[in-house]
Amino acid sequence: MHGEKRSLYYVGRSLSSPLRARLVERSWKVEVLEPGTVPKAGQRQLSAGILDFSSLEFPADLRYLHELLASSLTGWVAVGHREDLEDATVRGLIRDYCFDYITLPTSDDRVVDAVGHALGMVALQINTAHDARDGHPEGEMVGSCDAMLGLFRSIRKVAMTDAPVFISGESGTGKELTAVAIHERSTRRDQPFVAINCGAIPAHLLQSELFGYERGAFTGANQRKIGRVEAANGGTLFLDEIGDLPLESQASLLRFLQERKVERLGGHASTPVDVRIISATHVDMQTAMIEGRFRADLYHRLCVLQLDEPPLRARGKDIELLAKHMLDRFKKEASRKLRGFAPDAIAAIHNYGWPGNVRELINRIRRAIVMSEGQQISASDLELADYVEVAPVSLAQARESAERQAIELALLRHRGRLSDAAQELGISRVTLYRLLTAHGLRADVSTVPAQDSAA
């Protein structure tokens, strides 16, 4: 651990001699960045960083930090006094870019250990992005756009806790892949991952699927069956499409979350079960609660930490990346050798709105692989010939489209928090409300628990 030198940036004005000595002793090569300076792109490498808010001047020194911290090659650890967190910009920088926040006073060893952990975590992020670009096998998440890299950061953060996670997003965006990624990076990775689609099982069978039954509990119950909740003991239970869970089952699930025990149908004994709950849905939960279709007390137990899956249309060049990844994955199903996508197919892939998201992309590519007759997949093979050329737009329409996309991406990055999104966009919260209305966007505000604000 103490052989090869590792790079570390210190951002601040007063790196103490004892801390510097301890870092050097632990094989860190320390470079002090004076406030207002950013390493040149060619100089950036895999590194850790200490962001010392206690020695920065507010707000002057905070203005340039977004550019510096946005580098995905550096794992940042923030240090500062508790009162530094009163500044909204500081809280946003820590939440979006830092792997840890250490309150002063603290020991030098605590800081050194934290930057070592941050370096390891950012190395995982680099590998994830490289895997996406190289097109690795089935089961891995693919993406290198800002929205997906932000999702990767959030996955790593929530994986280190045992709190319930709620994943929201449109149908077909890959919510189960996110749940699996959280499980595989958690301390429960060696235990079961059990998924149940709450919308695919008939309501009268859901209770027995969740909690199991004893022999003789009902006609046809010839032997005891362990429910999905109990089968996940020690691991993770993924409740997909939780918004479609019937009210009766909602009450039973809430009881389990409160007591952490299950009682099989037809049984009288309670069995303790230790599981981490991850749930997901495409349903607008605020509306579902207002209309009485979903219990508010259950929602707030499930939605302790919230992640938002970005829609495919908001992922920019990732769409082409995903398309090529899926072609490589499924082209063995073709009766001849395929050489990729024709130029008109690439144009159509970028022009189409993808209402079915990644699931629709996969289905169109698999169908095209089987049905195409040439050596390249064309827009017609994808049944997207109408999207090869986009109708001319006026300058006003182009501005409106760019404005809408900027708002959508800001809301995704800040998980629906309007104040933070408005600050990033450089507008007031009132102006953001007006623009949301003008563009027909829903102003869903995610509630993030206090303990997550400095995660």
Image: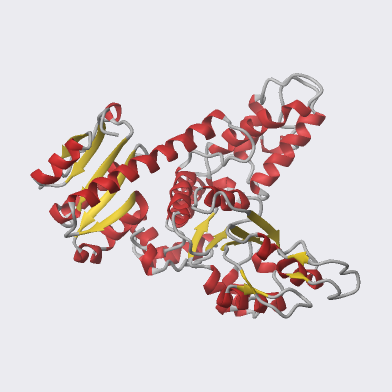
Q: How is the image coloured?
A: secondary structure
In this view, the residue in front, 22 or 438, is 22
Residue 232 in sight in this render: yes
Location of the N terminus (image quadrant) = top left
Q: Is residue 215 above or below residue 190?
A: below
* Residue 106 placement, left or right of 306: left
The residue lying at 17 percent from left, 39 percent from top is 33
The residue lying at 66 percent from left, 51 percent from top is 172
In this view, the residue in front, 324 or 314, is 324
Give percent across and percent down for residue 415: 46, 59
The residue lying at 26 percent from left, 52 percent from top is 78
Q: Is residue 331 above or below residue 12?
A: above
* Residue 84 placement, left or right of 330: left
Number of numbered labels in the structure image: 0
* Residue 49 placement, left or right of 241: left
* Residue 58 placement, left or right of 394: left
In this view, the residue in front, 265 or 30, is 265
Q: Is residue 304 above or below residue 399?
A: below
Give percent across and percent down for residue 198: 71, 64
In this view, the residue in front, 407 or 255, is 255
Give percent across and percent down for residue 19: 14, 45
Location of the C terminus (image quadrant) = bottom left
Give percent across and percent down for residue 247: 69, 78
Q: Is residue 410 above or below residue 445?
A: above
Residue 310 in sight in this render: no
The residue lying at 62 percent from left, 78 percent from top is 255
